[in-house]
Image (cartoon, coloured by chain):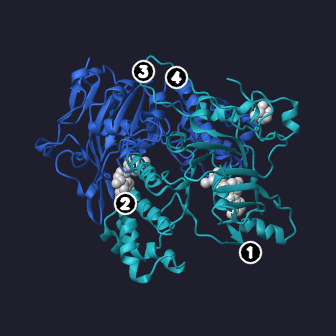
Chain colours: A blue, B cyan
Amino acid sequence: MSGTMRNPLLEVTDLVTEFATRKGILRAVDKVSFAIEAGEIVGLVGESGSGKSVTGFSILGLIDPPGRIAGGSVRLGGRELVGLPPAQLRAIRGKAISMVFQDPSATLNPVLTIGTQMHLAIAAHEKTSEAAARARAAEVLARVGIPDARSRLDAHPHQFSGGMRQRVAIAIALLNRPSLIICDEPTTALDVSIQAQILAEMKALARDLGTAMIWISHDLATVSSLARRILVMYAGRIIEQGPVADVLRHPRHPYTAGLIASLPANAEPGRELRQIPGATPSLFDLPPGCAFAPRCAFSSAACAQAPALHHAGPRGWRCHHPRGMEEAR
Amino acid sequence: MTPLVLAQNVSKRFAPRLGLGERIAAKLGSPVETRTVHAVDNVSLAIAKGEVLGLVGESGCGKSTLGRVIAGIHPPSAGQVTIGGESVMREGRKSTTRIQTVFQDPFASLDPRIRIGEAIAEGPLAHGLMRKADARAEVARWLDAVGLPAEAAERFPHQFSGGQRQRVAIARALAMQPDILVCDEPVASLDVSIQAQIVNLFLKLRRELGLTMLFISHDLGIVRHISDRIAIMYLGRIVETGETEAVFAAPRHPYTRALLDSVPKLVTDSEELVSFKAIAGELPSPLSPPPGCHFHLRCPHAQAVCREIVPASDSQGGMHPVACHFPLIS
Ligand SMILES: Nc1ncnc2c1ncn2[C@@H]1O[C@H](COP(=O)(O)OP(=O)(O)O)[C@@H](O)[C@H]1O
Ligand SMILES: Nc1ncnc2c1ncn2[C@@H]1O[C@H](COP(=O)(O)OP(=O)(O)O)[C@@H](O)[C@H]1O
Ligand code: SF4
Ligand SMILES: [Mg+2]
Ligand SMILES: [Mg+2]
């Protein structure tokens, strides 16, 4: 997939991540490949359990036993991260790559003030005086929309609202000016009005700082208004990818097409929504070949074989019977 | 038309929920939070027979509390709720089976040790709405109505997927043969591809059973799709009500306008310049709502009067009702 990209910032190739469980080996991420350019925002969408978070954790080397990266490669600026010793990974995490989670309490320590936590986050990667760290922390807090940032440094996480706590977590992720931020559904638990504020700020920040972003979400609309490219996951695989507007207008994979068609915005009010039948398969019990086949209106005998990744320019899909090829440009 | 469900000047206040630390502090005589939460503040609503009323607003604005008061689960602190002229409560207890509720989390409302069939029959048997001899057939009928096979009756909740569990919860509510269903975020915890299935089920049930519904959701797209009318709630009060399409086409309250603008749109044109129009500021604490219009701190149109006087609901010139001193004109 990186063939179209000259100098990718991040290059993920055939990544496989598995968990050993009582029921057997669970392959949460299955041969995932994609690349991201410096400063680019890419949306990673899929339903719960499709492997979005595990993909993010795998890039950061945050897969602990009984999980393991069972194959593939993750390169940041050309440097292989898979198999790096823990100390070297720690030097990269929070510095070159950082992550924002859905629940800010995954990042924030309840007993420390925001200022102390931000000082520690800087000190983990470079020597600074406390005064310099505070100044930088206040500046970044202000950038993410926290009013009166300097005095808020002495507050504890519980003294912030949910939306403000998420902003603090984002500020910590930005502190060391990473080249890539992985945002794992950071606005899913927030109200739309707060989500709109944070989306606007993130978009401006990524642009101004030149930070690349992987924005994980289950919401196509959010991704379409934020990202330039989209990756669609289903049952551990990326089944479609490409420029976001193009994919939404002319989805190739029947699953992507089904998701778009099922949106209320694409139906007459009060009329039946177009629905995808069935439910997402258990990863222990995947059908052979295309995992979407049992729910797919277009499946044929060919679909019992796993479809290879097909390319056309910036677009990619894994399907034997892609949609809308007649209208392809 | 006389409404089927009528909520008149309903308020619901909660005493503060004290944590352990605060309870100890209170015992030791330290000052603790004693203000009450005004979760629902003087709300009046009417739902016509066969109508779907959507109730939207951000978390904490009081949607669930209002839904529970209307369903007779919580007694109101003031005001009353009637169905066909009869109060839903008598002596502090729910006194009707005509209104039932479907909650967001179907697992929470199902006992993991009880078979689905028993769970569905339990309520109607207890209320004499079903004869023991008919239970099996009745359960099968309601399972069929929600798209599940009769064999599902023998299974336990954990043997169902999230979407199927919500179907079970709906079957359970329907078996009480209600006229009205209060649905509190019934698709919020479901996967996107499953949400459409459940929305379609509600549309079908409404058509086939003539159900009246109060449909609570924070998802404006789904509410718009399913509701004939909508009510917008902000910090305990209804700020605007009207025909769904009229409100979406021409919102009259500045909050409604801002809320609609906050929802990300599906952008399918790469040339389109996306700008997020966010409402300034945050929701004030329901412990200390601002005086006057609850929205005035965030409202771009607020004047002095907004800070002092609570705007009354007004439907001037035949337009849909709005509680604002300076309604938007479009
Ligand atoms: N620590 C773990 N141990 C075992 N299975 C896991 C673990 N973390 C994730 N999984 C499984 O991996 C799959 C993908 O999970 P995840 O990446 O969290 O999905 P998503 O973020 O798309 O909702 C799921 O089936 C999940 O149950
Ligand atoms: N049982 C309760 N005790 C104390 N406060 C409550 C209780 N239930 C709800 N509240 C408070 O009432 C307000 C409205 O809550 P709720 O009706 O759940 O809002 P919504 O459903 O719109 O998110 C919130 O401030 C909430 O904390
Ligand atoms: S009453 Fe005033 S503050 Fe409230 S919404 Fe209307 S204009 Fe804004
Ligand atoms: Mg996840
Ligand atoms: Mg609620």
**Mark 4 → mark 1, Cα distance in angstroms:** 55 Å
Q: Point out which mark residue B91 bears.
A: 1
Q: Are discs 1 and 2 less than 8 Å apart at CB?
A: no
Measuring from the top left, give residue B326's x and y in whole percent.
Answer: 78, 29
Q: Is residue A121 above or below residue B109?
A: above
**Mark 1 → mark 2, Cα distance in angstroms:** 39 Å
Q: Earlier in the sequence, mark 3 or mark 4?
A: 3
Q: Nearer the viewer, mark 3 or mark 4?
A: 3
**Mark 1 → mark 3, Cα distance in angstroms:** 59 Å
Circle 4 Cα neighbour tier, 10 Å, few/some/many (<14 / 14–19 / ≥20):
some
Give left or right: position of B19 versus B270: right
Q: Earlier in the sequence, mark 2 or mark 3?
A: 2
Measuring from the top left, give residue A131's x and y in whole percent.
Answer: 70, 34
Measuring from the top left, give residue A258's x and y in whole percent.
Answer: 33, 39
Q: Point out which mark residue B274 bears.
A: 4
Question: Is residue B179 shown to the viewer in this render?
Answer: yes
Q: Are discs 1 and 3 less than 8 Å apart at CB?
A: no
User: Could you tell me which residue is drawn at 31 percent across and 65 percent down?
Assistant: B149
- Furthest-bottom residue in this view: B133
Q: Chain of mark 4?
A: B
Q: Which residue is the site of mark 3?
A: B269
Q: Is residue A259 above or below residue B21?
A: above
Give left or right: position of B277 versus A237: right
Q: Which residue is the site of mark 2?
A: B161
- Secondary structure, mark 3, is loop
**Mark 2 → mark 4, Cα distance in angstroms:** 37 Å
Q: Is residue A311 above or below residue B156?
A: above
